[in-house]
Amino acid sequence: MSVVLGVESSCDETGFGIVADGVLLGQGLASSAAQHAEFGGVVPEIAARAHLEAAVPTLQLALQDAGVELGDITHVAATSGPGLATAVHVGLAAAKSIAWSLDLPLYGVHHLAGHAAADTLEHGPLPERSIVLIVSGGHSSILHVGDLVRDPIEHLGDTLDDAAGEAFDKVSRLLGLGYPGGPAISRAAQGGDPTAFAFPQALMRADDPRYTFSFSGLKTSVARTVETLERRGEPVPVADVAASFEAAVVDALVTKALRAVQDRGLDTLVIVGGVAANARLRAVAQERCDALGVQLRVPPPSLCTDNGAMIAAVGDLLVRAGAEPSGLGIGADPSAVLHGAQLPLP
Ligand code: KG4
Ligand code: ZN
């Protein structure tokens, strides 16, 4: 049996995960988020330094958690893109050192395919075809997915400007709620009224592109609202602004993703990526999927945000599909587009 070690370092999480035959054996995770908080966003150099410091202890945590020895690992998989170049380099170099010293095959993995594979660790293999909504700090895409590691991935739509997570982070900053913005907005929104402000939703008219998102106008509208209130010397109702913003993002995401499911005559929607940890997104998607008889799959929140388990999950699928290893010569591809789960594309 293969025992695959996955390595993730594309942003501010250092993750190692160990997967065998579709089963997560254990994982270790370290985050440098607290070190970026004062800057309001991830500082690549700080993230890279933190990965370097966290790599060995986090690998040890993963091995302990899984109850395996380094010598039990049979294959290594690592995020080789997309992500912050300096950050990806650290994890990829660590993965290469492990693979070379233990004489193991190395697979380069597309980070976003990792997000999709995370769901298989909780809910088993994906159906033959599904619509996958990926919502992270850098991407918001609607994908038509078949076999995650064998079939090409069809992009139905992306965002024209900010990613959903990026919008959460920027709005959080302007409301003074800190970084990372998603969990902060979500907490602030709990006591708020999602109908208090009718923030504009872009590209939602019938003749607009059906699967394309745009969140920068929404973010600007929140900024104008806050500015106007402050200029008038009125208090900013943070909870109501956060709840109304969150409701607008969630509505756009769920509406367009379900449109794709129906247009393609499919019956499964998979929502993954950091923003999939959002409680409102999970609840609204569940409600609307139930109403349409669509099966909704969302990983548990801890597997939505970046981690090493999801990269090991892709590695495990590649190994079991008989894919050729990417080899020790692979480089980082910081802006890799998601056409397939393995990098570089074989
Ligand atoms: O997938 P991820 O961990 O990293 C990237 O690949 O980008 O996603 C991080 C993003 C951040 O923008 C963060 O604010 C957002 O996911 N996020 C959330 C929540 N938790 C994380 N957004 C909304 N609600 C949450 N609970
Ligand atoms: Zn991610």
Image (cartoon, rainbow, N blue to C red):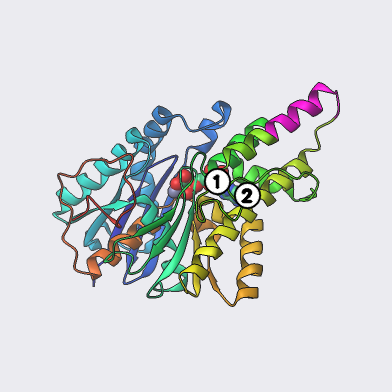
Image quadrant holding the C terminus, namely bottom left
What's the magenta bit mostly, secondary-structure-wise?
A: helix
Quadrant for residue 119, please give it. bottom left
x and y percent of residue 336 in the render? 31, 44
Q: Is residue 196 above or below residue 287?
A: above
- At mark 2, the secondary structure is helix
Residue where numbered disc 1 is placed: 164
x and y percent of residue 121 in the render? 42, 67
Image quadrant holding the N terminus, namely bottom left
x and y percent of residue 89 in the render? 29, 37
Residue where numbered disc 2 is placed: 249
What residue sits 35% from the left and 70% below the top?
22
Q: In this view, does 201 lie above or below 325?
A: above
Q: Is residue 158 magenta?
A: no
Q: Which amino acid does label 2 sit on?
A: Val
What residue sits 42% from the left and 34% below the top?
47
What residue sits 43% from the left and 69% below the top?
130
Magenta residue span: 222-234
What residue sits 24% from the left and 63% below the top?
72
Horizontally, is 272 left or right of 105 in the view?
Answer: right
Callout 1 touching callout 2 (CB < 8 Å):
yes
**Is residue 242 visible in the rendered structure shown here?**
yes
Q: Distance between the residues labelled 1 and 2?
A: 7 Å
User: How many numbered markers are drawn?
Assistant: 2
Q: Which amino acid does label 1 sit on?
A: Ala
Label 1, ligand 1: CB separation under 8 Å: yes
Mark 1 or mark 2, which has the lower sequence index?
Answer: 1
Horizontally, is 4 left or right of 212 in the view?
Answer: left
**Is residue 299 visible in the rendered structure shown here?**
no
Q: How crowded is mark 1: few (under 14 residues within 10 Å), some or many (20 or more)?
A: many
Q: Nearer the viewer, residue 83 or 69?
A: 83
